[in-house]
Image (tube, rainbow, N blue to C red):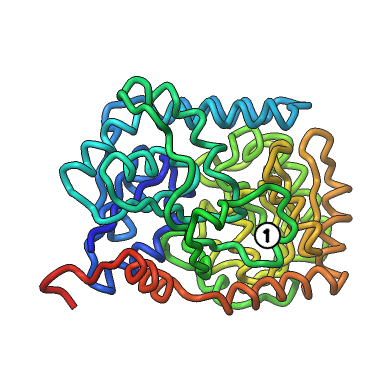
Amino acid sequence: MRYLFTAMPGASHLYPMVPALRAARLAGHDVLVATAGDAVGAAARAGLPVLDVAEGQEIAPVFDRMLGDILEPGLSDGALMNVVATAFATIGDRMIDGLLAAARAWRPDAVVYEPGMSGGLITARETGVPGVVHGVGLRHPTAWGMFGMAPSARRLGIEHLPEHPDFEIRVSPDSLEALNETPGEDEAFVTQLLMNPTPFNGGGELPEWALSRGDRPRVVVSMGSASAGMREGRVLTELVRGAAALDAEVVVTTGSGGLPAALDPLPKNVRAVSWLPMSELLPVSDAVIHHAGMGTMYAAYAAGVPQLSVPPSGGQPAPHEVTEARGAGLTLMPDELTAREVTSAVRALLEQPGFRAASREVAAEMAAMPGPTAAMDRLTRLIGGTATEGEE
């Protein structure tokens, strides 16, 4: 079979699908990634064939504006959703023509897309093949992303936008979904396949200290793909200072932007690294502070590590609220965040056993879900396909 995978620009949108991509290839299927922006390089580094479907289009500035806008103090849930939907619709419009052209040329047997990439389902319908939504965390309905694609559909002469995919690869376990207040795909229309999320954060060289736990609790501070205002400014300074006030080893990932001047010099118990894969670092850590992104959050769940979420705003679905309700972590909002509050929250995560117990329960639940190989095998059987002719 031939599987066309598509994701919004940005490695964090692609990475959750890499385990399924690799499983499909190992089963003998042809795969192609169709994406844009930073995700093109991320796919190539993961050893996957990739096509840039928005070459020459302005992509990064749209994301940058969105990340800046969602940090506006007091942003309501409705305003946040509008900011995100507008940005995704703009990017989706710049990708849909190339995506349709790629599908018509490559002729896949199914299109697999992540929830932010509504153009994937449009492409599946327009080329007459099944559409498969690949979850990246908490579930939400197709309609959330699809309504923003209406102008693109009119431009392309598409009369009706699809309402449901044919299949859903669900990576979120039952105990989290029971706390998720937003509806997922309607199972009356969509065949659901469970899959262990199997966190993938890219490869990289690991320092020896990251192979095992140290003498003190290890606290990781990672703001992921949050905007520079959170990674490099007051918020990150308060997070690092608050964690460093504890008798703990603090590891802060800086990305390409470095650290705020206010953190020079760093406290003696803080180690700064540009980047390390969370899937390798978190299993030997005791707590993680992050921006409530699904990638880091689900890597923490899988590792059984308590979490302190610092989301840029509210919004739905609110994954940090689910983490709190599950007993696996705490939340601090960035607007008035102080180092003292961070110290108190992280101390609770390290010293109160309930957070660790709940986190490990979620990890065990995820580990019991079918792996990527089993999930892709089942999907192939349901679609009615086999491995590509001539391959094992």
Residue 330 in view (yes/no): yes
In depth, the one of 378 and 83 nearer the eye is 378
Could you tell me which residue is drawn at 88 percent across and 55 percent down?
344
On screen, 258 above or below 175?
Answer: above
Query: Would you identify the image quadrant in which residue 179 lies?
Result: bottom right
Say left or right for 131 vs 260.
left
Furthest-left residue in this view:
390
Query: Position of 126 compared to 86: left or right?
Result: left
Image: 380 above or below 74: below
Residue 276 in the image: state x and y as whole percent.
51, 59
Q: Where, quadrant-wise, is the N terminus in this rendering? A: bottom left
* Viewer can see residue 249: no
SS for callout 1: helix
Decide if residue 181 is on the left or right side of residue 271: right
Quadrant location of the C terminus in the rendered image: bottom left
Residue found 49% across the figure and 46% down from its top: 115
Query: Which residue sits at x=50%, y=28%?
Result: 148
Q: Report the label total.
A: 1
In this view, the residue farthest toward the front is: 188
Specify few, some or many for label 1: CA neighbours under 10 Å numbering under 14, 14-19, or 20 or more: some
Compared with 390, 59 (above or below) is above
Q: Position of residue 338 (x, y in %)?
A: 84, 41
Instruction: Name the residue that disc number 1 marks.
Output: 177
Identify the amino acid type marked 1: Glu
Q: Residue visible at 41% across and 40% down?
A: 9
Residue 332, how many percent across, how many down? 80, 46
